[in-house]
């Protein structure tokens, strides 16, 4: 899944929640034009902003990002929950053992 698919998923979930582009953009403190460009793949999507969008849409970030695949944990302080890609970068979400 590339950023185009992520943008499409953001739009789909936003519309299902009954939020206008302007409503979501205002809650994120970004312009409607900027959000529209992300949803239509005219602008790259920053991972931190996608996280904020997931929070505003009340969905797990994994619903917006693809899983890259199951891998053996390489994290000494906890287990890996999921991985996702944004562009050519891979990110991991981990559960930390206290």
Image (cartoon, rainbow, N blue to C red):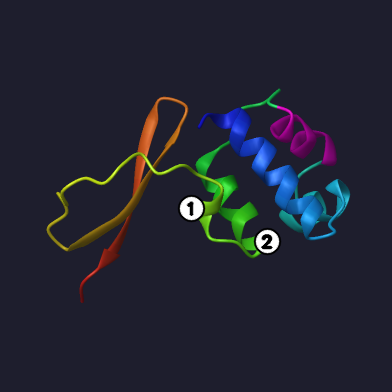
Ranked by sequence position, the earlier of labels 1 and 2 is: 2
Q: Quadrant of the C terminus?
A: bottom left
94 shown above or below 83: below
Q: Is residue 38 magenta?
A: yes
Dot label at residue 30: none
Report the residue at 68% width, 60% height from top.
Answer: 57
Disc 2 secondary structure class: helix
| Place of residue 73 in the rendered image (x, y in percent of width and height, measured from the top left) | 17, 52
**Residue 20 coordinates in the image, percent (x, y):** 87, 51
Residue at left offset 64%, top offset 65%: 58
Residue shown at 81% from the left, 41% from the top: 31
Mark 1 to mark 2: distance in Å? 14 Å
- Residue at 60% of width from left, 61% of height from top? 59
| Magenta segment, prevailing SS (helix, strand or loop) | helix
Return the x and y of residue 40 as percentages of the image width and height.
74, 29
Most extreme residue toward the bottom is: 98
Horizontally, residue 25 falls left or right of residue 75, namely: right
Q: Can you give x and y, in whole percent of width and height, for residue 63 in the image?
A: 54, 52
Residue tagged 1: 62
The image's mark for residue 56 is 2
Asked where in the image residue 5 lies, by quadrant, the reply is top right
Q: Relative to 44, is 35 above or below?
A: below
Establish if 66 lies above or below 18.
above
Judge whether residue 94 is colored magenta. Answer: no
Q: Is residue 78 left or right of residue 26?
A: left
Q: Nearer the viewer, mark 1 or mark 2?
A: 1
Along the horizontal axis of the image, is 38 left or right of 98? right
Q: Which segment did they paint magenta?
A: 32-40
Q: Residues within 10 Å of mark 2 (few under 14, many from 20)?
A: some
- Secondary structure, mark 1, is helix
Q: Closer to the camera, 57 or 68?
A: 68
Rendering quarter of residue 19:
bottom right
């Amino acid at each position: 899944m590339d950023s185009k698919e992520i943008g499409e998923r953001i739009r789909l979930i936003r519309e299902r929640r009954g939020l206008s582009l302007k409503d979501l953009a205002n809650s994120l403190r970004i312009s409607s034009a900027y959000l529209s460009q992300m949803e239509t793949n005219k602008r790259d999507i920053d991972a931190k902003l996608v996280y904020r969008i997931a929070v505003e849409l009340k969905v797990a970030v994994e619903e917006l990002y693809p899983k890259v695949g199951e891998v053996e944990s390489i994290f000494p302080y906890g287990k890996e929950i999921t991985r996702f890609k944004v562009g050519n970068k891979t990110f991991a979400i981990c559960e930390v053992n206290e």
